[in-house]
Image (spheres, helix red, strand yellow):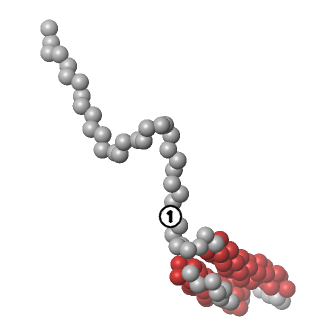
Amino acid sequence: MGAESVPRREVVTGRPRPAGGTTTPRPAPSPYPGSEVLPEKLIRRQLKAALITTALLALPLGLLPVLLRILPLAHAAPRVPLAVWLVLGVAPYPALLAIGVWYVRRAERNETDTAAGAPAEHP
């Protein structure tokens, strides 16, 4: 017949479990030593910055159709005037870029202040 199979050997590399059954997990160390309140402050500050950014983006872009409706360009010739092209195609982008840069700087400053443990809020 054939050769007998040899049982495979298992290697255990972990620590042995204590006798008595279950173990309780240890809580993870806080990334902010000394305070458990700091992550909540960071979340609130980031939420505030996000809401301000959303308002700064939504208000002008939401009012853009209203502005174009009340402009006296609706009765113009079939050609689209240069002013409309500027308002639609050029004007929003510098504002979008500036708001985006402001938000990124604000978010980074919030994280840096929270990591350093600074409790002061920036305007």
Residue at x-position 24% and y-position 28%: 8
Q: Quadrant of residue 107?
A: bottom right
73 or 77: nearer the viewer: 73
Using residue 98 as the reference point, say whether residue 33 is left or right of it: left
In the rendered image, residue 54, in percent from the top left (x then y), is placed at 70, 77
Determine if residue 95 is in view: no
Name which residue lies at 80% across and 85% down.
67
Q: Which residue is mark 1?
A: 29
Q: Callout 1 environment at 10 Å: few (<14), some (14 to 19), or many (20+)? A: few
- What's the residue at 66%, 86% (across, down)? 121
| Amino acid, disc 1 | Pro
Relative to the observer, which residue lies in front, 109 or 100?
Answer: 109
Above or below, 40 relative to 28:
below
Residue 58 vs 13, above or below: the answer is below
Q: Residue furthest front?
A: 19
Quarter of the image with the N terminus is: top left
Q: Position of residue 106 (x, y in %)?
A: 60, 84
Q: Position of residue 102 (x, y in %)?
A: 60, 86
Q: Please give left or right for residue 66 compared with residue 42 in the image.
A: right
Residue at 30% x, 40% y is: 12
**Looking at the image, is 21 positioned above or below residue 55?**
above
Tell me if I can see residue 4 in this picture: yes
Viewer-proximal residue among 42 and 99 = 42
